[in-house]
Image (cartoon, rainbow, N blue to C red):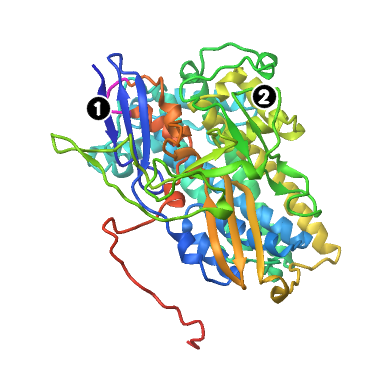
Amino acid sequence: MSKHIVVDPITRIEGHLRIEAVIDDNNTIVDAYSASTMFRGIETILQGRDPRDCGLLAMRICGVCTGTHYQRSIEAVEDAFSITIPKNARIVRNLIQGALYLHDHVVHFYHLHALDFVDVVSALSADPVKTAAEARKWASVAGTTPYIDGESEFKAIQERVAKFVKQGRLGIFGNGYWGNPHYKLTPEQNLIGVAHYLQALDVQRDMAKMQAIFGGKNPHPQSIVVGGVTCVQDIQNPARLALFKSLLLQGTKFIKEAYLPDVYMAGTMYAGEATDSKATFSELVGGKGVGGTGGGLLNFMSYGDFRLDDTGFYKSALLFPKGVVMGGDISKVLPLDEAKIMEDVTHSWYKGDKPLHPYDGETIPEYTGLDRRENGDAYLKTKEKYSWIKSPIYNDARVEVGPLARMVIGVAAKDERITKYVTNFLKRGNLPVTVLFSTVGRTAARAVETELMADVMVEWIDELTKNVLSGDKSTWTEFDFDEVSVSAKGRGMAEAPRGALGHWVRIENGKVANYQAIVPSTWNAAPRDHKNRMGAYEASLIGTKVANPEQPLEIIRTIHSFDPCIACAVHVVDTKGKELAVYKVDTSCSI
């Protein structure tokens, strides 16, 4: 007899997410539904505004993806006005965005996702001496030295956590599923994870400082403007450039000596869940690979990002190539056709009767509520509308976006840098390439990308320093707004830490006529579409074995592997259609 599991809210994410799953008599998930319970209305707020102001408002879509929406919005307007920014501006934007990647990925693994693998209570029974040896072992696998490997350091951390437990002050570690049989790390490995969790709190703070050096502040940097950047004094100050590089190198040390070894440790201990296939790399290139638990759609898409030259935003070479891989077949990458991007609202709480391209997209709420059962519990109306997230479609298919998509497409495109980092990771861990197509693989791909990003950012800060020393101080391209403001449209399509992010704007008479944003968590967390096809979250849960339905650890682990940012996909609405508030901003105020 099947059983219905409701996990609401999913915690350790940004925003509000509900997952409903149906399990069979063997506790295996046979059906799943992903729903967001809040509405996003930024697009409607932007209508009628000066397009040059869109970035400052669009960035408020999220306080986690700081600067990503800001930059995409600015780039959409630059595309509409055919603006090419100066070299310094390009590099600075890369550095701001790169700092976000490092910060976001480290925070995600340790503070949002690690507790899906690490049993905190088990760490209390660890032997500090054996823990130190274990830390050296996994650092060796990663080809480095451990971030910490002293017996006294691990013992001090263990005693610190034990004190919290004894006093009943577990705080953020409270209410966990400690002792669940699907936790697989040894007590010593758990202690390593807890230690790095606490140390990552300091590391991520310094990574946030990196973004603020050129962005002005964090969250919500404000130095990016239509035409370039405003941080002129920062790029001309050798001390600021040196500080950025110093913080970068410190963060890189943690990434290589803690983050990567921990992912090797988790990936090895959970490898049985990752895949039951022993396909070789060459077999997967031939399209013969299969995914493990959490593999999901096996269709991947990337818009590409991080320009490496100044030939123009949609012409330059990219660190992450754009493209599509279907069915997990990395023998080929398909070219990205922007015209094939659509959004469907069949199962979303919006009005609409057909998929629309973002330039023509609509955001008209139509909330139809939840289903009230006899026992009084509320369930999603899964045959009708059941989420505030729309359902994006690419070329009449559902796709996954994110770090795994970028790494898969990079390998399929035979990108030299990405292929090197991916193959080195798999070789060092003695892991089959098929491990990537799973919950564990999605987590590993993010770690691989973090190491790659940290290394390439050293090249970028050196490039910026050299360019400024050569005498190039340009940071902004002048443009004539009046000549192009009557009618124009543009898009800002690139990558956020969580995946493909696009902002589309249509301008009429100098004002925004229509604005649409499709964010990574819209692609991944979406409900079924007009053909009843699952989104990435939903598909990834099918076939997952749940050890204890009262402790849905496996559901949370797989969903967390996508790093959900539901605030990006939704915001707030009164379900009865009542107007919540009206605000008027007087920009002429002298105060």
Q: Give the answer, above or below, for where 316 lies relative to 552.
A: below
User: Along the line of sight, which residue is nearer the eye, 152 or 114?
Assistant: 114
User: Along the line of sight, which residue is nearer the eye, 7 or 366?
Assistant: 366
Q: Which mark is residue 330?
A: 2
Amino acid carrying mark 1 in the image: Glu
Residue 550 lies in magenta, yes or no? yes
Number of marks present in the image shown: 2
Residue 325: x and y in percent read: 64, 29
* Residue 366 relative to residue 315: left or right: left
Mark 1, secondary structure of its residue: loop
Q: Which mark is residue 219?
A: none
Q: Quadrant of the N terminus?
A: top left
Q: What is the span of residues highlighted in magenta in the rendered image?
A: 547-552
* Residue 99 relative to residue 352: left or right: right
Residue 10: x and y in percent read: 34, 40
Q: CA distance from mark 2 to mark 1?
A: 38 Å
Amino acid carrying mark 2 in the image: Ile
Between discs 2 and 1, the one toward the N terminus: 2
Residue drawn at 13 percent across, 34 percent down = 375
* Residue identifier under label 1: 550
Residue drawn at 65 percent across, 58 percent down = 490
Callout in the foreground (2, 1): 2
Q: Quadrant of residue 477?
A: bottom right
Residue 349 lies in magenta, yes or no? no
Mark 2, secondary structure of its residue: loop
Q: Residue furthest right?
A: 470
Residue 219: x and y in percent read: 50, 60
